[in-house]
């Protein structure tokens, strides 16, 4: 009986332990982080998770937090190069806006990623008053002629930040309800969880690349039109990049709200948005058309040292930030030459919402090893081509850094200084002839000794034969 129990125990461990191990490994591929727990009312709290990139995007559900409202979700994709292998990581960040100042006790939260539940222990967020900034976007909004601002009534509006973008240039669509501050109508939303998704499907362009702000609740803003104050309830916001010159038709859609007429009676009120069109402009004929981002970009770069010796590793960091479609940036590594050697350590693409636009950046970390002494302008190696919408032509961002290298030429000799702890570390500094007899046979000396003996023997034979 004792042997039978032992056999069953072994079978149990063999069957169930591998499954538990696989479960732990799956969870190890996902990491969860929370943002700063001390913020102001103008700052945002965040929860993010990172997952090893796969062919399919992860499914996720961020938790609700009492006292906060959800804002947009940003995402980034990072690639790290280790031992000539690429490891890609996706990061998703949910932003929250505090409803007001105070100490908010956040209970146990549950974040669901790929049907796995990650528990976040209770904590306290300290929210202090911040300097409120009103978003005055009246200069950006073209109010249709059908909207009469003089009657001080609410109106429903779908708008675009640009009506004549270049092919590939970003434009942002928003769908909002505007209510004047001196409004006398008592209004309430009517099943927005059903009608808003239906309205979004009607206005969403199809021949465009989309970067969605993922507004899960309405965003409340304070705006002005012609000196009059309004409260904007923004239901939808997404940035689009036209893929061709086809005209984009945004139809008229209708929002239903409820107006209170008596203490217990409400009647539906229908507010219509105006239809409009977006006409993408053709880009100049060029071999790079459709292959590089279109928009406005800036370059931020840094290097850990501007003066180095040959063979010294140097770390160069570059970040290209702009409002174009950053997925189009070229990912090939910088080619090494006789003077400088380059090794791409990591690259990362981040897409994040800011005000009325979706921005993106591409960050690269490159290790530089100087091979020859001299002065080198990094602009000859690091440059990013894009279409500049302000100049209406293709433009190039170039590095402004200059590297000064001193020392003797390396001439591409073997260098294992970066093999920390490896079996080949400093092997190029060893003399191959300095080998101990008690550890290895010096075959070169042995062969030379045998050849000398054979040569002497042959000479002796010729001497004997001559007699």
Image (cartoon, grey):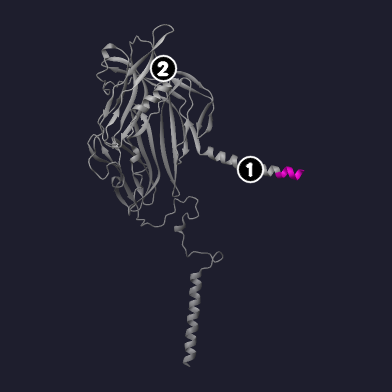
Could you tell me residue 124's position as x and y percent?
50, 23
Q: In the image, is residue 102 above or below residue 207?
A: above
Residue visible at 48% across and 23% down?
Answer: 65
Is disc 1 in contact with disc 2, using a CB cutoff of under 8 Å? no
Residue lying furthest right in this view? 1
Helix, strand or loop under label 2: loop
Helix, strand or loop under label 1: helix
Q: Quadrant of residue 395?
A: top left
Classify residue 365 as left or right of residue 123. left
Q: Nearer the viewer, residue 457 or 351?
A: 351
Could you tell me residue 323's position as x and y percent?
31, 33
Q: Quadrant of residue 338?
A: bottom left
Task: Count neighbours of disc 1 (C-alpha within 10 A) and say few if under 14, some if 14 to 19, many if 20 or more.
Answer: few
Residue lying furthest top in this view? 263
Task: Count neighbours of disc 2 (C-alpha within 10 A) and say few if under 14, some if 14 to 19, many if 20 or more.
Answer: some
Magenta stretch: dominant secondary structure: helix
- Is residue 374 something that shows in the picture? yes
Which circle's residue, 1 or 2, is located before the other in the chain?
1
Q: Which quadrant of the figure contains the N terminus?
A: top right
Q: Of discs 1 and 2, which sits in the foreground?
A: 2
**Label 1 vs label 2: CA separation?**
53 Å
Q: Which mark is residue 87?
A: none
Q: Which mark is residue 190?
A: 2
Q: Which residue is label 1 attached to?
A: 15
- Is residue 320 something that shows in the picture? no
- Magenta stretch containing residue 14, yes or no? no
Q: Quadrant of residue 281?
A: top left
Q: Nearer the viewer, residue 270 or 187?
A: 270
Residue visible at 59% across and 41% down?
Answer: 19
Magenta residue span: 1-7
């Amino acid at each position: 009986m004792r042997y039978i129990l032992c056999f069953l125990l072994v079978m149990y461990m063999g069957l169930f332990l591998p499954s538990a191990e696989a479960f732990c490994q799956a969870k190890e591929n996902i990491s969860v982080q929370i943002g700063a727990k001390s913020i102001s009312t103008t700052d945002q709290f965040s929860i993010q998770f990172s997952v090893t990139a796969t062919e399919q995007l992860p499914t996720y559900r961020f938790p609700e937090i009492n006292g906060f409202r959800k804002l947009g979700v940003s995402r980034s994709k990072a690639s790290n190069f280790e031992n000539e292998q690429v490891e890609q990581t996706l990061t998703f960040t949910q932003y929250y806006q505090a409803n007001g100042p105070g100490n908010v006790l956040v209970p146990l939260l549950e974040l669901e990623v790929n049907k796995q539940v990650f528990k976040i222990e209770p904590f306290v967020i300290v929210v202090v008053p911040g300097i409120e900034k009103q978003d005055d976007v009246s200069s950006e909004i073209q109010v249709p002629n059908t909207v009469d601002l003089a009657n001080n009534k609410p109106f429903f509006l779908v708008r675009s930040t640009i009506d004549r973008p270049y092919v590939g240039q970003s434009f942002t669509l928003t769908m909002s309800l505007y209510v004047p501050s001196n409004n006398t109508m008592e209004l309430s939303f009517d099943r927005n969880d059903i009608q808003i998704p239906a309205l979004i499907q009607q206005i969403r362009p199809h021949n465009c690349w989309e970067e969605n702000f993922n507004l899960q609740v309405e965003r409340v803003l304070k705006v002005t039109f012609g000196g009059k104050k309004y409260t904007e309830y923004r239901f939808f916001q997404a940035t689009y990049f036209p893929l061709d010159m086809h005209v984009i038709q945004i139809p008229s859609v209708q929002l239903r709200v409820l107006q209170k007429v008596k203490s217990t009676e409400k009647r539906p009120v229908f507010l219509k948005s105006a239809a409009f069109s977006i006409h993408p402009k053709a880009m100049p004929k060029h071999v790079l058309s459709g292959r590089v981002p279109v928009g406005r970009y800036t370059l931020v770069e840094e290097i850990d040292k501007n003066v180095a010796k040959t063979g010294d590793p140097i770390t160069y960091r570059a970040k290209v930030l702009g409002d174009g479609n950053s997925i189009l940036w070229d990912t090939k590594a910088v080619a090494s030459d006789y003077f400088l050697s380059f090794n791409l350590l990591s690259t990362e693409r981040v897409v994040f919402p800011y005000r009325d636009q979706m921005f993106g950046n591409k960050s690269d970390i490159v290790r530089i090893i100087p091979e020859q002494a001299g002065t080198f302008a990094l602009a000859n190696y690091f440059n990013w081509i894009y279409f500049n919408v302000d100049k209406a032509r293709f433009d190039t961002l170039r590095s402004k850094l200059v590297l000064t290298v001193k020392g003797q030429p390396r001439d591409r000799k073997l260098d294992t200084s970066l093999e920390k702890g490896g079996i080949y570390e400093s092997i190029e500094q060893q003399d191959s002839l300095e080998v101990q007899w008690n550890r290895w046979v010096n075959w070169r000396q042995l062969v030379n000794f045998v050849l000398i003996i054979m040569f002497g023997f042959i000479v002796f034979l010729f001497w004997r034969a001559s007699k």
